Image: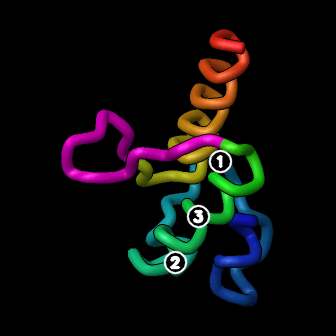
Amino acid sequence: MIADKANPGHGEVRMTDSLTELGIDSLEVVELTFLLEEKFDVEIPFNANSDIEAKTVADLVSAVEGLVAAKAARA
């Protein structure tokens, strides 16, 4: 999903890549967030009051993994 939002021709997407380096702007981060929420059935609180800050691919992956794990623990 992240690679689909990256600039064409960027090449392989690595965990250390920043979303900015990939050419993913703020609107695309919002779109990506909605896609990830839908796919993993979680709510990603990316806002001013959130502890989650996604600057890199790893940040985003870690946030989603944590939310999925927390949801599984509550089930």
Report x, y in % for residue 66: 59, 26
Q: Which amino acid does label 3 sit on?
A: Phe
- Residue lying at the far top of the rendered structure: 73
| Residue numbers of the magenta segment | 42-53
Look at the numbered disc 3 and give the secondary structure of its residue. Answer: helix
Distance CA(mark 3)–CA(mark 1): 20 Å
Quadrant containing the C terminus in the rendered view: top right
Magenta-span inclusion, residue 45:
yes
The residue sitting at 72% across, 89% down in the picture is 8
Identify the mark at residue 28; answer none if there is no mark: 2
Relative to 40, residue 20 above or below: below
The residue singled out by tag 1 in the image is 15
Report x, y in % for residue 25: 44, 79
Q: What residue type is labelled 1?
A: Met
Q: Which amino acid does label 2 sit on?
A: Glu
Quadrant containing the N terminus in the rendered view: bottom right
- Residue lying at the far bottom of the rendered structure: 8
| First of labels 3, 1 by sequence position | 1
Q: Residues within 10 Å of mark 1 (few under 14, many from 20)?
A: few
Q: Nearer the viewer, mark 2 or mark 3?
A: 3
Say if mark 2 contacts mark 3, CB within 8 Å: no
Look at the numbered disc 1 and give the secondary structure of its residue. Answer: loop
Relative to 30, residue 50 above or below: above
Q: Where is residue 34, by image quadrant?
A: bottom right
